[in-house]
Image: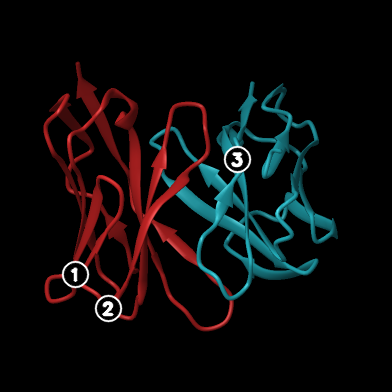
Amino acid sequence: GESVGLHLPTLSVQEGDNSIINCAYSNSASDYFIWYKQESGKGPQFIIDIRSNMDKRQGQRVTVLLNKTVKHLSLQIAATQPGDSAVYFCAEIRSGGYQKVTFGTGTKLQVIP
Amino acid sequence: DTAVSQTPKYLVTQMGNDKSIKCEQNLGHDTMYWYKQDSKKFLKIMFSYNNKELIINETVPNRFSPKSPDKAHLNLHINSLELGDSAVYFCASSQKGTDTQYFGPGTRLTVL
């Protein structure tokens, strides 16, 4: 079946460095993607989204890049801080009627002080 | 000012028991969801309700029965609990026509 997956289950980054979390998706019909952050003991929290007609979107310290040719999504976090330590999920959404979200397997980001 | 709340936060019970998890959202959303997150952090949608009507029902054992008394509440009742039901269950809500889901803090269910 269709899937959304992440290449790296765990990523360790020095504080202050930039982080890049990758995600591969296989359903070319997906037209919307979201990155969620899940801190320990909490529910996933929306970080940033991107529509399939875009290839880049920037937020505060975060940038999402979408490469539809290779079905690849990435989340870049600038100047990573200890508070960025969490599990990050990419999710794909297929529009048309009610929203159904398919989550990737998650990447754990560990920030080394 | 909690947006999506769940009770209880932790639930420990014996195999074969029946238990319920409650979810409430005060965001005025019309769509609510239940997700199951396993020990490897994989999130899988179970159910989705819009205005108290079931919209999405993934392949979930019929021991799981969602109930939506009104559009601000979506409760999850589980009959004859099994060891494999141990997981963290998340409730979420969104407004139809928008794409962002807001998640509750989760309920950690442990079946002994």
- Label 2, secondary structure: give it: loop
Q: Which residue is mark 3?
A: B89
- Tell me what residue is drawn at x 30 percent, y 54 percent: A59
In the rendered structure, the answer to whether residue B26 lies left or right of residue B46 reads right
- Label 1, secondary structure: give it: loop
* Tag 3 subunit: B
CA distance for labels 2 and 1: 7 Å
Q: Which residue is mark 2?
A: A28
Q: State the hue of chain A.
A: red
In the rendered structure, the answer to whether residue A35 lies left or right of residue B18 reads left
Q: Which residue is mark 1?
A: A71
- Give the vertical position of B105 relative to A31 (above or below): above
Q: If the image is split into quadrants, where does the N terminus of chain A sit?
A: bottom left
Choose mark 1 or mark 3, whichever is in front: 1
In the rendered structure, the answer to whether residue A112 lies left or right of residue A102 reads left
Q: Position of residue A50 (x, y in %)?
A: 32, 67
Kind of residue indicated by mark 2: Ser
Please give the letter of the chain rendered in cyan. B
Contact? badges 2 and 1 (CB < 8 Å): yes
Kind of residue indicated by mark 1: Lys
Q: If the image is split into quadrants, where does the C terminus of chain A sit?
A: top left
* Residue at the farthest bottom position: A96
